[in-house]
Amino acid sequence: MHDVLARELAPRVKPRNVLLLQGLVGPFFWQVGKALRAEGYGVFKVNFNGGDALFWKFSPGGIFYTGTIADWPAALGAIIARHGITDVLLFGDCRPVHRAAIAVCRELRIAVHVFDEGYIRPDWVTFELGGVNGHSQLPRDPRYYLANARLLPPTPPHHPVPSSFRRRALEAVLYDLANLATRWHFPHWHNHRPWSAWTEAMSWLRRLAGRRAATARTEACLQQLAGTPYFLFPLQLDSDAQIRFHSSFTGMADAIRLAIASFAAHAPADVTLLLKEHPLDNGLRDWRALAAQLAAEHGVADRVRYVESGDIAIIVRAARGLVTINSTTGTLALAGGVPVITLGHAVYDIPGITFQDGLDRFWAAPGAPDVEIFEAFRRVLVARCLIPGGFFSDAGMDLVVRGVVARMRAHCPVAFSASSLEERLGVPAWS
């Protein structure tokens, strides 16, 4: 009977051919491709610029795309047909080339697996089928998580992994240099970020030169706040797709204006609003100056503070509540029982977990997250779309790559249904 089943299955299991589009800057997609190739997958990679090609390291299956964004959907369709692609992997689903690719894959019924920074941090990576963040298929109904968490095994122990900012910076510099050197070969390539590599590099140099003074300002501010109640507003990157695509704001300036105006009008007089700069902010916008200006205009200059650095976990833990657009710092706060309100679309913005009654009311009575619902949500999230590890160390990347291989193996599309096979064989398919 098993021989009959094997013969019936053999021609019907669809060969797995994977197409990688743009990954995070660095060798991560090269590592993923190498691991999947060792598992027997056909592996192909579209390189849109010299940086992509550099980190693909001349591995087999590399495809140069030098056309326009308008011609990209047709070109992708041809690549999928030529190589029999069954799965597409990409990092971030809001880049122009990825938005177009997802539309093509949806029409052709090709599975799209999306990477992103982890919904829960640190030391997790998001790997979700279909889309992430505001495009995630995760429901917002707490009953779903309570019911499904009961069916899952206990979450395995989670361990921190090393991460190197220096490595991240070096890989970004190499990527940009490779792009500049090969610009002639990719004339239509445009970075999804709004600034040129040169502009960002100069701004980062200014930030690094002022790091010592910024650290001293942060330490002095946090010492003054010790033991006093404050709400935390961790800023996100102004160019982040989370803001541009998954909120009603045009950028961080709009969100800062809203938060400070609401705080001034509705927060108790004895609390402070603390804004924290994103650790990867390039410094092209002076958020400190904007916050000071707005606080003065609203008469709360003595109650709005700003820090550029500091351990986010410690700062969150001491906060009375956290205001965010949709940052993953929200899940860090929730894990510590700190009340959270989101101003945009976030996968964790679920009744019982986050505050649902508006920002103006949050300041006076933020409530507390429901521990049972959050733990159920976290368990489902880990099982469905999180992989332990990180992108910026060999140890972290190795964990993620092994997790990707396991998830891809678990999601194995085949060209038959169990019921139809039972009918053809006249026996239960898995007996």
Image (spheres, rainbow, N blue to C red):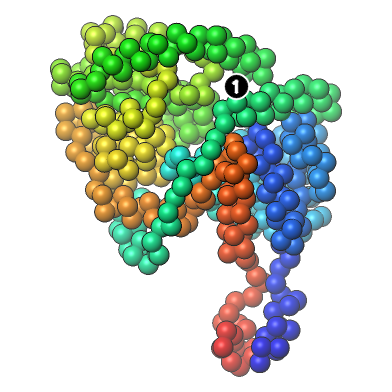
| Residue of label 1 | 194
Which image quarter is the N terminus in?
A: bottom right
Q: Secondary structure at mark 1?
A: loop
In the image, residue 153 lies at what x, y percent? 40, 65
Residue 98 visible in image: no
In the image, residue 282 lies at what x, y percent? 54, 18
Q: Is residue 50 above or below residue 43?
A: above
Q: Is residue 106 found left or right of 361 in the rendered image? A: right
Q: Residue at x 48, y 34 (%)?
A: 242
Q: Is residue 46 found left or right of 370 in the rendered image? A: right
Q: Is residue 107 found left or right of 46 in the rendered image? A: left
In the image, residue 405 lies at what x, y percent? 63, 57
In the image, residue 45 lies at what x, y percent? 75, 45
Residue 276 visible in image: yes
> For residue 146, which quarter of the picture?
bottom left
> For residue 349, which quarter of the picture?
top left
Q: Residue at x 70, y 72 (%)?
A: 13
What residue type is disc 1 on? Pro
Q: Is residue 302 above or below residue 349?
A: above
Q: Residue at x 22, y 16 (%)?
A: 264
- Total numbered badges shown on the rendered structure: 1
Q: Is residue 41 above or below residue 240?
A: below
Instruction: Please name whichever residue, 250 or 14, is drawn nearer the observer in this view of the structure.
Output: 14
Instruction: Please name whichever residue, 355 or 26, is drawn nearer the observer in this view of the structure.
Output: 26
Q: Residue at x 51, y 49 (%)?
A: 388
> For residue 254, which quarter of the picture?
top left
